[in-house]
Each structure stands twice: as C-alpha cells, then as structure tokens.
Amino acid sequence: MARLAVVTGAGSGVGRATAAALAARGLRVVCVGRRIEPLRETVQTIGDGQAVSADVRSEEGVASVRAAVGTDAVATVVHAAGVEGLLTMADTDRATFGALVATNLGGPFFLTQALLPVLEGGSVVFVGSVAAVRGRDHHAAYGASKAGLLGLTVNLAAELAPSVRVNCICLGAIRTPMLAQAVADYTATVGEARAQATLAAERPRMLLGVAEPELVAQSIVHLALDAAFTTGSVLYADGGYTAR
C-alpha cells in the first residue's frame, strides 16, 4: 500500500492540520506551499514529511512537487491551498480573477495531472467552499473558482475510475489565518457597521459555529483514506451552513 501523501497549503490552517492527521495515520507527507518556513514548521510538528516550496499556479511549481514525489506511489493528494479575494464584480479586474482561478482551480487541476502516473489506487481530495453553492456579496470571483472544483470532481471521478477516487469537501467557517484575513479585508472594504451586520446575519446559518482546522481535517482524511466506495462526491463539512 502506498504510504506517501501530498498536501498543498500545508503551511497553515486546514492544510497543516490535514498533513498532521495523515502523518498520524502513518503516511509520509510532502508538504507543499509557497513559503518555506511555515512548511518546515509543519514538518517538524508532524515528524515524517518533506517541505517543498512551490507555487502550483506555475508549471515550474508543479514540476517541483512532481520531482519531490519521484517514483513513489501516492496514497492521496489533498488540494488545500487557496486564496480568497473578496471583491465585488465591479472591482474585480482580469489579473485578480486570473490569480484566483489559477490558484483555486488551475493548481489542483495541473498538479493532479502531473501526479497521475503515481496515483494508481490512490485518491484526490479537492478542498472547496460553501461559496460555490451559497451566494454572498463580494464572493463572485472566489465562488466561481471554487464552483469549478465541483465540476472537476465529478468529471475526473468518471475519467479515472476505478483506479483513482476523486472527491471534494466544501468547508464553511474554519478558524484559520485565511478566515481572519478575509474578515479584515471585508471590513476594510465595506466599513465596520456593514461588516458587523453581515456577520450577524450569517451566524444563524452557522449551526455548529466556527470549526478548528483539526476537526475538518478528520473529514478530509476520511475521504482520502477510508471512503473506499466513494468517488465523485461532495461532502459539506460546513457546520450546517448549507442546511438553511
């Protein structure tokens, strides 16, 4: 059985928690991200891993990850890297839109493509967002980039079955640096009063509140390693957000 995992966005938040959870299951984890120091911290924490500084938006970044994996069989690749640009459609220029799509959709697509030769019998987990299926202001570009993962999940599952399982997990509010930055950016854009009003309207939809990364990492590992009869599926680990 393959004992290698690849996790992008492993320097913090959900990616780091997922790397730790996979290492706890006995896998060696290739921890991928753009900044090397946080990745080294992750590797030091989990004990059995390798830090690879790479921007998977680029061909060079994807090639770096592929080289780090080598010929080792990969049990799972978890695409946890992402960026959340909160802008109105009117304020979204082509460069910003392109960067969101390149990170949130292009990176997962082309890194999976590069790893296909060593993924036989393994799995792919895309980390999506409830923004793909629930509308909010300032989320048009981000939501569209995450919605693309839903289409990629079902079509790639059909293409790669039965040798590779492909699933997506759509997350709600997770206590991460990315969430904190998104709230700060939104507040700076719309002002404190409107930001607080938006948060007040959102809280009733968050039936289980805000999750710690370690909690959703358990669900990611389930899809990655344990859900042997599941492919082409989307799991909503959103604390009940989409229930209303």
Image (spheres, rainbow, N blue to C red):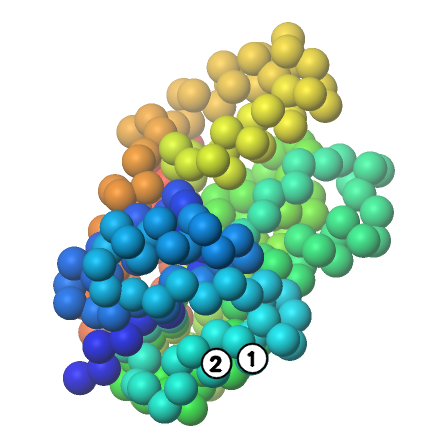
Q: Which residue is mark 1?
A: 63
Height in image: 173 above or below 118?
Answer: above
Q: Residues within 10 Å of mark 2 (few under 14, many from 20)?
A: some
- Image coordinates of residue 34 in percent, x first then y, are 55, 57
Height in image: 216 above or below 176?
Answer: below
The residue at the point 63 percent across, 75 percent down is 60
Q: Secondary structure at mark 2?
A: helix
The amino acid sitting under disc 2 is Arg
Q: Which residue is mark 2?
A: 66
Q: Which mark is residue 5?
A: none
Q: Is residue 198 visible?
A: yes
In this picture, residue 8 sits left or right of residue 183: left
The residue at the point 57 percent across, 32 percent down is 182
Figure disc tally: 2
In this picture, residue 192 sits left or right of residue 131: right
Q: Secondary structure at mark 1?
A: helix
- State how far apart marks 2 and 1 are (Cα): 5 Å
Quadrant of the image occupied by residue 188: top right
In this picture, residue 125 sits left or right of residue 141: left
Q: Residue furthest top?
A: 193
The amino acid sitting under disc 1 is Ala
Q: Nearer the viewer, residue 86 or 51?
A: 51
Q: Is residue 227 visible?
A: no
In this picture, residue 143 sits left or right of residue 122: right
Height in image: 17 above or below 119?
Answer: above
The residue at the point 67 percent across, 53 percent down is 100
- Image coordinates of residue 173 in percent, x first then y, are 42, 35
Badges 2 and 1: C-beta atoms under 8 Å apart?
A: yes
Q: Quadrant of the C terminus?
A: top left
- Image coordinates of residue 4 in percent, x first then y, are 28, 75
